[in-house]
């Protein structure tokens, strides 16, 4: 109901905003990770002024990501080769109102990084191109296996000629940080409207306090963990002796 009322407000606002062909928003701009967090989903909704198709790109936070390749050495499988990619989003999703091939030309997909094959992952400048391609494919496989990337394009549904919506699913292992949700209105192979909305994934509650303590006071946290483990072992032994 809240999303429906927001859509009506957007629709009422748009006739007075002729220069803005696209308006969109999220049902929430914060995903709060608490103890027992098992994933969640957000609703993105909006309205367009005039005809066109919609593409939604969710990504973030970007970071340097390492990809390792295992090799068999002396009968054991170990990590032998490694390559680092800069600018790799920790989470990535794309949704569209139609199959991308029907209305988004390759040049536009490359410009806006629409689809995992168009992500600009920066490999070392001196790396062998064949090796870059192999490690890039490995990075995409790893991210997809962790449900952080999705090669499949999600669905943006139109509710009438102007209103649209889509749901963005976030897994339980979604990384914390700042995200961007970019919405594009495409007409005639050109982007005629765009809007970027920020959102955040943060740890809250006791879990967040423990996480911050472990990173800010790593030595003390490690010592406490050892003491707790020793005490738990002693207590268990005492109970079983009785």
Image (cartoon, rainbow, N blue to C red):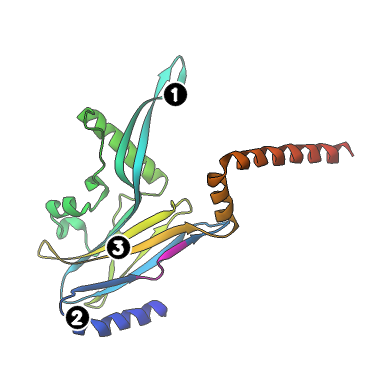
Q: Which image quadrant for residue 72?
A: top left
Reading the chain from its start, which is encountered first: label 1 or label 2? 2
Q: Which residue is mark 1?
A: 78
Horizontally, is 232 left or right of 155 in the view? right
1 to the left or right of 136: right
User: Closest to the observer: 46 or 89?
Assistant: 89
State the quadrant of the C terminus.
top right
Which residue lies under the disc numbered 2? 17
| Quarter-of-image position of residue 184 | bottom left
Residues drawn in magenta: 26-31
Instruction: Sort mark 1 into few (<14), some (14-19) or many (20+) by Cα contacts within 10 Å.
Output: few
Which residue occupies the extreme left position in the image?
A: 188
Q: Is residue 76 above or below residue 212?
A: above
Magenta stretch encompasses residue 30: yes
User: Which quadrant is home to the N terminus?
Assistant: bottom left
Q: Earlier in the sequence, mark 1 or mark 3?
A: 1
Residue where numbered disc 3 is placed: 155
Above or below, comparing residue 53 to residue 212 in the picture: below
State the separation of the CA atoms marked 1 and 2. 59 Å
Name which of mark 3 and mark 2 comes first in the sequence.
Answer: 2
- Marks 1,2: beta carbons within 8 A: no
* Percent position of residue 26, x then y: 36, 69
Task: Name the quadrant containing residue 236.
Answer: top right
Q: Residue, x 55% and y 59% (percent of image)?
A: 34
**The residue tagged with tag 3: helix, strand or loop?**
strand
């Amino acid at each position: 109901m809240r999303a429906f009322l927001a859509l009506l407000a957007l629709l009422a606002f748009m006739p007075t905003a002729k220069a803005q062909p696209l308006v969109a928003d999220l049902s929430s701009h914060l995903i709060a990770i608490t103890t027992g967090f098992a994933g969640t989903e957000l609703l993105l909704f909006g309205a367009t002024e005039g005809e066109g198709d919609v593409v939604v790109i969710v990504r973030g936070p970007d970071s340097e990501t390492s990809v390792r390749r295992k090799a068999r050495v002396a009968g054991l499988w170990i990590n032998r080769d490694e390559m680092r990619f800069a600018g790799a989003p920790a989470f990535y999703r794309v949704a569209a109102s139609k199959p991308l091939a029907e209305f988004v030309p390759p040049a536009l997909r490359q410009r806006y990084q629409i689809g995992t094959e168009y992500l600009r992952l920066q490999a070392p400048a001196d790396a062998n191109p064949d090796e870059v391609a192999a490690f890039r494919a490995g990075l995409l496989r790893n991210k997809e296996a962790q449900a952080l990337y999705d090669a499949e394009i999600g669905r943006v549904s139109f509710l009438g000629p102007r209103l649209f919506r889509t749901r963005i699913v976030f897994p339980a292992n979604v990384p914390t940080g700042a995200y961007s949700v970019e919405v594009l209105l495409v007409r005639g192979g050109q982007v005629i409207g765009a809007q970027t909305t920020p959102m955040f994934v943060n740890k809250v509650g006791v879990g967040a306090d423990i996480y911050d303590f472990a990173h800010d006071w790593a030595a003390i946290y490690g010592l406490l963990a050892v003491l707790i483990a020793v005490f738990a072992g002693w207590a268990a032994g005492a109970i079983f002796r009785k």
